[in-house]
Amino acid sequence: MQGSLFLDTKTLAWPSRGHTQTSSHHLRRLTPPNSTIKFRQPQPISAVATSPPPSLTRQKTHSMPPEKVEIFKSLEGWASEHVLPFLKPVDQCWQPSAFLPDPALPKGEFLDRVQELRDRTNGLPDEYFVVLVGDMITEDALPTYQSMINGLDGVRDETGASSSPWARWTRAWTAEENRHGDLLRTFLYLSGRVDMLMIEKTVQYLIGAGMEPGTENNPYLGFVYTSFQERATFISHGNTARLAKDGGDPVLARMCGTIASDERRHEMAYSKIVEKLLEVDPTGAMVAIADMMRKKITMPAHLMYDGEDPKLFEHFAAVAQRLGVYTADDYADILEFLIGRWRLEKLEGLTAEGARAQEFVCGLAPRIRRLQERADERARKMGPHAVKFSWIFNKEVVL
Ligand SMILES: [Fe+2]
Ligand SMILES: [Fe+2]
């Protein structure tokens, strides 16, 4: 999984609350807190080229009308036929060990393979490792994502081993995803380029912190979110693959490219579910897409912390933007791609509310690009500045 980067720095702020920092684009529009809604204390940040998405103003739960649970029940046959085939049988799946030195080799040979792995990374700069570590940490917080999906009404795994196709999908999807973090983590460990202790601490903090995607236990929102996120990870892993190849590490390029192709397959499955929802409930699905886009798609690792840098996520996202691994343009591209994929511009049979949602979503990408251009301009005027990352032994990286 990966995340969103575009911003409006005028309304952007970074709350300071221990390690559970998030940001908000909407703070000026907030209504005052009441006794049941927790607000976060905002604190301005100095602008960088990118920003994390807004914190939700409130944590809404179970927003899908209960009668719509039936829609997901009635789609079980369809899901078995059209969603489960996007999974790969285990014996046809790659495993991390296929890309890594074989520990069963005689000791000298194994150490030679490790040395070759290390030599291949010589052409890759530290800033590349910052992005690869951030991606790996994002993958490693997988328990959070499985929990999120199992929080969705009507599709959750009720028993832990439910035979419903929704539950079978979620378990097998998790099992496929689990290889991504494993592979990247072992590679990074063997590379010797990164501080594993700080990475491990970041993973522990992140899983402990959770995430705030704004999906409200609502599978409409949840599947819009996962469609967007899977495409975001497809793009970012594809870009780390390209940079690895350019930097002289074809094996790492193959690893990242292989992960990217899994993400693409997952994107196809999730976006197919949304496509089906648009067919059976056009207004409900259209309004859900608009709702998620209004909130902005939150990066799954937006609460990351290493015990040292309270703006760690923001700094990681800025490096990813600068290296072109995941940028604000990508965010707008994903939106445009999904608008085309779901044929939203031609969607018919909408109520007035649905039509308003359609108009908002279909006109959003150019607005995002304009906001980003202005933010880029402001960042250029401020000039570059460097930040230390604990993940690479406190070496500095230019943002
Ligand atoms: Fe993944
Ligand atoms: Fe994925």
Image: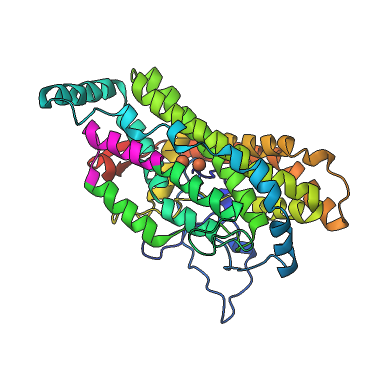
- Indicate the quadrant where residue 126 lies: top left
Q: How many marks?
A: 0
Q: Quadrant of residue 179?
A: top left
The answer to whether residue 2 is magenta is no
The image quadrant where one finds the C terminus is: top left
Task: Give percent across and percent down for residue 47.
Answer: 48, 46
> Is residue 231 among what the camera can see?
no
Residue in the image at 48% along x and 36% along y = 321
Q: Position of residue 148 (x, y in %)?
A: 52, 58
Which residue range is magenta in the image? 179-196
Q: Is residue 161 above or below residue 125?
A: below
When the figure is inspected, residue 113 is found, relative to residue 224, above or below; the finding is above
Residue 76 in sight in this render: yes
Q: Is residue 150 above or below residue 381?
A: below
Point out residue 155 in the picture as x, y percentages from the top left corner: 61, 58
Residue sitting at 55 percent across and 44 percent down? Answer: 229
Near-viewer residue (10 or 225): 225
**Residue farthest toward the bottom in the current orientation of the protein:** 35
In reply to whether residue 194 is colored magenta, the answer given is yes
Residue 386 location (% of width, % of height):
34, 39
